[in-house]
Image (spheres, rainbow, N blue to C red):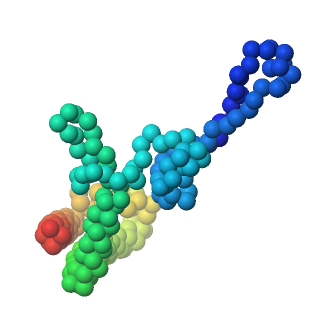
Amino acid sequence: MYGVLVVSVDDTEDNDELLMGKQQLGYLKAYSGIMPRPQYGGSNINKEKNDNRFVPLVYDGFTKSTTTTSSSVDDDGDHQRFDYENEQESLKSLTKEIEEFENCPKRLEDQKQLKDMEIELYNQLLEAKKEQKVNKRNRKQRRDQFRQKLIAIIEQQQQRYSNNSNRNNNKNENNYNNDTNSKDLHKYFLENDQGYRLLEDQLVEESTCDQRQFKTIKRDVQNKLVEITK
């Protein structure tokens, strides 16, 4: 960032001249940060010319160091100068080594194999989840089908006794009508039909087994992912 400061040079004791606007004007120009190249105001062989252009640097990182260390403290406790150019070359060398390592054919091949293994494990987990959902839908379908059979039997019984004088009493005894919702039907058949209770016990057991199996697969996949990413 560059900055210019306009200043007034007051070298006269005559207040009249100041009031008439005859005081001298000057300016200071400076920059923050480090100039990377001499042509932009950084370090320059002609030190005087450089100082005439900008406010002198508090610290010139491009000045050659008399030591090979980055930044150290001598016996007197004074900090020795940081050799920017030498350290920059060291950083470039390290950057080059990193780039060579990142672009190593064997490393790229290992990364590809790792990615393929991760995709395979995630697909295995997704397939297990899909199977769990399919089994859940099948259980619901079996429950609904069995419930519809029971409903059909009750409706046939109601139709058979529709002309009976005890029709209303019979209906109240069954505690069932066509407007009963699915939740109430489920409760009603659990309380009044042994076959429905046996089926429900079997479906609950299958659901528990599915959940246990999915958790096992999920745990195995997570462990394998941790193992291959070490």
Residue 96 sits above or below residue 65 on the image: below
Q: Position of residue 207 (x, y in %)?
A: 20, 67
Looking at the image, which is closer to me, 66 or 90?
66
Looking at the image, which is closer to me, 64 or 58?
64
Q: Position of residue 71 (x, y in %)?
A: 26, 47
The residue positioned 50% from the left and 49% from the top of the image is: 47
Quadrant location of residue 182? Answer: bottom left
Quadrant location of residue 162? Answer: bottom left
The residue positioned 23% from the left and 44% from the top of the image is: 72
Residue 58 sits above or below residue 209 on the image: above
Residue 168 sits above or below residue 14 on the image: below
Outermost residue, right side: 20
- Residue 113 visible (yes or no): no
- Residue 69 visible (yes or no): yes
The residue positioned 32% from the left and 64% from the top of the image is: 89
Looking at the image, which is closer to me, 86 or 210?
86
Q: Position of residue 154 (x, y in %)?
A: 33, 69
Which quadrant is the C terminus positioned in? bottom left
